[in-house]
Image (cartoon, rainbow, N blue to C red):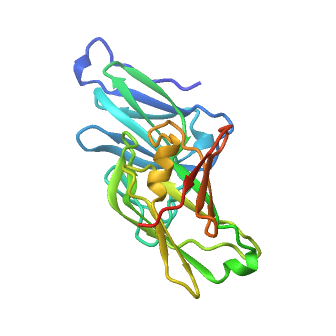
Amino acid sequence: MLTVPACTVKEERRDCPCYLQVAFSDPGETGDALLLGWRESALFRETVRIEECRPWTRAVEKGMLTVSACKGIRESILETHRVGIPAGHEADSLYAGSEVVDATGELARVEMPLRKQFATVYLDIRKTATALREYSFLVEGNTSGFDLLDHAPVPGLFRCMPKARDGESIVTFRLPRQGDDSLTVTVHSGNGLPATFPLGKYIIALGYNWKTAELQDIYVAIDLVNGLVDLRVADWEDGMEFPLVEI
C-alpha cells in the first residue's frame, strides 16, 4: 500500500503540496508514455513505464492543472505541449489522453485514458501491385500536429509521400486531427500529368468528425477511369460515392 504524507496540525496547511496520482485506465496497456503536467508552464515532464504506474505519484503545488499522457512518439517533435510532425513524415501512431485535475486538496487521482489520435487512410486507386510501381503520391494539408492539453489541431504544413509496400496494391498513410478541409492527395503516373484531388473535402462531406475522442480509419477508393471516389470509415455501415474532381 502506498502511504501519502499529510501535514501535521502545526504546519501551515496552505503550504502543503497536493499528492497527484496517475493511473492508466486500460489495465492491459504497457510500454513507455510521456506524462506532462501543465499550469502556466510545465510542472513536470517525465517518461514512465505504464505498467509501473499503480499509480504514479508526485507532489505538486496545490491548484488546478492539466495532466496529459502520450504514447507512440517516434518522428514527431514535442515543443512545450504541442506535438509537431516534421515535413516529409506522416503522423506517428499516437495514443493520448488529457484531464483537467482539481489538485486543491491533499490528494488528487487521475484515471488516464489513451485514445487513438491518428487516422490511417487506406488509398486504393484500383491498380495491381505491379502497376502501382509506376505511380507516386503526395499528401498535403494545413495541420502539422496536435496540442497535448486539449488535442486541438496545430496549424502548419503537412507533407508526405506514401508508398505501397512491395506486393501490395494499397497505399497507406497516417493523418493527425485536421483543423480544416484543405487536405489534398496528388496522384502521379509515370507517363501522365499529376492529378490533385480534394481529399479533405470528401472526408468532411462524408460526415467524418475530426473532433471525436478516438479517430477512426478511412478507406478511399479512386476510380481514375470512371471518375469516381468511394469513401468509407471503419465500423460505419455505409460509405459514400463522389464524382472525382481535380483541383
* Viewer-side residue, 26 vs 192: 192
* Viewer-side residue, 66 vs 220: 220
Seen at 45% across and 54% down, the residue is 200
Percent across and percent down for residue 13 are 26, 17
Q: Residue 101 falls in which quadrant of the image?
A: top left
Of the 4 image quadrants, the one containing the C terminus is bottom left
* Viewer-side residue, 212 vs 147: 212
Residue 134 versus residue 146 in the image, above or below: below
Seen at 35% across and 23% down, the residue is 102
Residue 76 versus residue 189 in the image, above or below: above
Count of numbered circles on the image = 0
Q: Residue 184 falls in which quadrant of the image?
A: bottom left
Percent across and percent down for residue 2 are 54, 26
Horizontal side of 155 relative to 162 (left or right) equals: left
Q: Residue 42 falls in which quadrant of the image?
A: top left
Horizontal side of 168 relative to 5 (left or right) equals: right
Tell me if I can see residue 141 in this picture. yes
Extreme residue in the bottom direction: 191
Extreme residue in the front direction: 226
Tell me if I can see residue 5 in this picture. no
Of the 4 image quadrants, the one containing the N terminus is top right
* Viewer-side residue, 66 vs 5: 66
Seen at 27% across and 37% down, the residue is 39
Extreme residue in the top direction: 9
Residue 201 versus residue 157 in the image, above or below: above
Seen at 38% across and 19% down, the residue is 6
Percent across and percent down for residue 33 are 52, 48
Percent across and percent down for residue 49 are 57, 47
